[in-house]
Image (cartoon, helix red, strand yellow):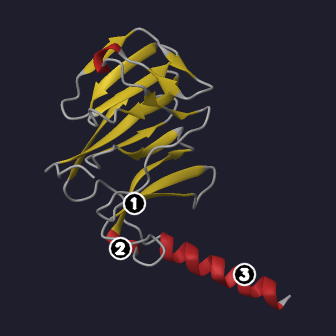
Amino acid sequence: MELDKMEQAHRAQILQTLRQIPCGVPAGWSHSVFAVGGLTHIGFSEQSPEKLVCISSQGQSVIDCATGEIQFCDENYDEYELIALAEPLGDEVIRLAGISGGGLRLCTKRGESLSLISLEYPKSQIVYASDFQTPFLSPAACAAIWNDYEPLAYGFSPCGNYIAIACSSDVTLFRRLTPLEND
């Protein structure tokens, strides 16, 4: 019984800490939302890290995260191998993340990270932290940048200047206001 009480007290303390995380767009970032019906997979280009490939029931597109421009292209992806080709990106093979698995970068060399927490399950929050902080030790230094039901995929671009969060109906993109050199 003593262990149960300790566990309950520990959980209460963690929840109290995580509820201190402010919501909103982190300083130095902007965000926009793109409606994409039936979204299933996303993936950043390694060669042009501002380009995000989106696979959906409506087709395949490439979003330029720097400008917001969307280019539609022929579908050319393998949901089992989690790869795609997109005409605007030439012959580069794009690694995908989404309903079939896979994942995007969850941290940068600059000490930024993204964490998924579920304080009010089934809703989830994605928490951005910088300077090697964590939501558990420095909640006030973090920001809950997304609050919705389970995301399909989320993560940083290869250069670390963009964050993409995908759910079945849209992609939320964050863009660093002053781009930094590639990670």
Could you say which is closer to the camera, residue 86 or residue 3? 86
Q: Amino acid at mark 2?
A: Ala
Q: Position of residue 143 (x, y in %)?
A: 36, 62
Compared with residue 49, is residue 137 higher up or lower down, i.e. above or below? Answer: below
| Earlier-in-chain disc, 2 versus 1 | 1
Q: Amino acid at mark 3?
A: Glu
Which residue is denoted by mark 1 in the rendering? 113
Q: Position of residue 53 (x, y in %)?
A: 39, 26
Which residue is denoted by mark 2 in the rendering? 140
Q: Position of residue 102 (x, y in %)?
A: 56, 39
Q: CA distance from mark 2 to mark 3?
A: 24 Å
Q: Are marks 2 and 1 in contact (CB under 8 Å)?
A: no
Q: Secondary structure at mark 1?
A: strand
Depth-wise, is mark 1 or mark 3 nearer the camera? 1
Q: Position of residue 16 (x, y in %)?
A: 53, 76
Could you say which is closer to the camera, residue 63 or residue 87? 87
Q: Secondary structure at mark 2?
A: helix
Q: Circle 3: is it few (<14), some (14-19), or many (20+) Cα within 10 Å?
A: few
Can you tell which mark lies on residue 49? none
Q: Secondary structure at mark 3?
A: helix
Tag count in the figure? 3
Q: Residue furthest bottom?
A: 2
Could you say which is closer to the camera, residue 87 or residue 36? 87
| Earlier-in-chain disc, 2 versus 3 | 3
Compared with residue 20, is residue 86 higher up or lower down, i.e. above or below? Answer: above
Q: CA distance from mark 1 to mark 3?
A: 27 Å
Which residue is denoted by mark 3 in the rendering? 7
Q: CA distance from mark 2 to mark 1?
A: 15 Å
Evaluate whether residue 148 shows in this view: yes
Q: Using residue 177 as the reference point, say whether residue 110 is left or right of it.
A: right
Q: Using residue 18 as the reference point, say whether residue 11 is left or right of it.
A: right
